[in-house]
Structure formats: structure tokens, C-alpha cells
Amino acid sequence: MATAATGSNPELTQEARQGMGKAALIVALLAVVLMVVFFFSLRQNIATLNNQVKGMTGAEEAVQTMENKVATLGSQVADLNGQMENLDGQVESLDGQVAQLDQAMDKLDGLPEQTRRIVYSTMVEEMAQQAALLGQQLDKASQEKLVEVNKLLEEVKKGL
């Protein structure tokens, strides 16, 4: 049998060669078709990946823009915090001024009483001066009575 396949029947070998050649050609064509299909499929996948990468680049730019906005907002918040601290200081200063005004108002509340005392004290002092002037012009008995009046006026003045 081995001799029949190799050399005794040349037509069979020719036929076998033609069949094997056709099979090789079909396999080669199938390989080419598969390679073309793989090529276009791979090309489509690469195009899709490229679009996704471009989308990622856009997303990275959007993230960078958002980071910049967040940084800007952070600096604005820091500025607002500084302004709030400044306002707190001004409010504390105003509170101090209000306290000073309250103290001044308390002093002013007592002012009419003080004014009355000053006026009365001045009037008593004036009366004492007039009594002293009168005492220089009167006799001894009247002068002694004016001395007692002056003592009483001094006591009144001390009481005010």
C-alpha cells in the first residue's frame, strides 16, 4: 500500500496534489478573509478606544476646570472668613463704644441732681458772703448772730 501511494499510480498523486492544492488555496483564502475580518474588527476597536481616550481627555479638562473653580471658591471663602473676622472686630469695637455711651448716659442721669447741688451750694456760698459783708457794717451783737448764721450756712453747704 505504501508503494501504491508514492509511485505506482501517478494519476492519483496528481489528483491528490490538485486536491491538496485546492485545500491549501481555500485555507489560504479563509486565512486572508479571517485576517481582513480581524483587521477591520481591530480597527473598529481601536477607533472606539481612541474616541474613549478623547472623551477621557475632555473629562480630564472638565475635572481640571472644576478643580480651578473649587480653588477659586476656596480663596473666596478665605476672603469672606477674613472679612467676617474684620466685622467681628468692628462689632466688638462698637460694643465697647456702646458700653462707653451707657456709662456716659448713667453720668448724665445723675447730672440734674449734681447741677441742683452745685446751684444750691453756690447760692449758700453767696449768702455766706453777703452775711460776711453785712457783718462788717453792723454792730457787735448783730455780728455774733451773723457768725452763727455763717456756721449754719457752712453746715448746709457740707450737707449738699
Image (cartoon, rainbow, N blue to C red):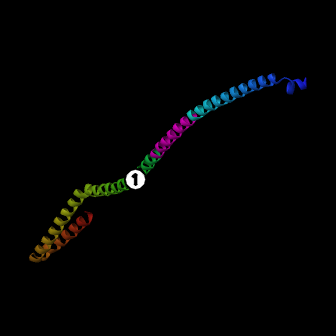
**Up-down relation of residue 32 to residue 150 (above or below):** above
Q: Residue at x 40, y 53 (%)?
A: 79
**Up-down relation of residue 79 to residue 128 (above or below):** above
Mark count: 1
Q: Looking at this view, is 104 or 98 the one in front?
A: 98
Horizontal and vertical percent position of residue 27 = 70, 28
Horizontal and vertical percent position of residue 50 = 53, 39
Q: Residue at x 27, y 55 (%)?
A: 105
- Residue 5 location, quadrant: top right
Q: Is residue 123 left or right of residue 83?
A: left
Q: Is residue 3 left or right of residue 92?
A: right
Q: Amino acid at mark 1?
A: Asp
User: Which segment is the magenta one?
Assistant: 45-65
Q: Which residue is mark 1?
A: 79
Horizontal and vertical percent position of residue 61 = 47, 44
* Image quarter hosting the C terminus: bottom left
132 is within the stretch colored magenta: no
Q: Looking at this view, is 118 or 159 the one in front?
A: 118
Magenta segment's dominant SS is: helix
* Image quarter hosting the N terminus: top right
User: For mark 1, does the 10 Å Cα neighbourhood hold few (<14), some (14 to 19), or many (20 or more) residues?
Assistant: few
Q: Is residue 22 left or right of residue 61?
A: right
**Up-down relation of residue 62 to residue 105 (above or below):** above
**Up-down relation of residue 140 to residue 152 (above or below):** below
Q: Looking at this view, is 51 or 133 the one in front?
A: 51
Horizontal and vertical percent position of residue 82 = 40, 54
Q: Residue furthest left?
A: 137
- Residue 20 location, quadrant: top right
Q: Is residue 143 left or right of residue 2?
A: left
Q: Secondary structure at mark 1?
A: helix
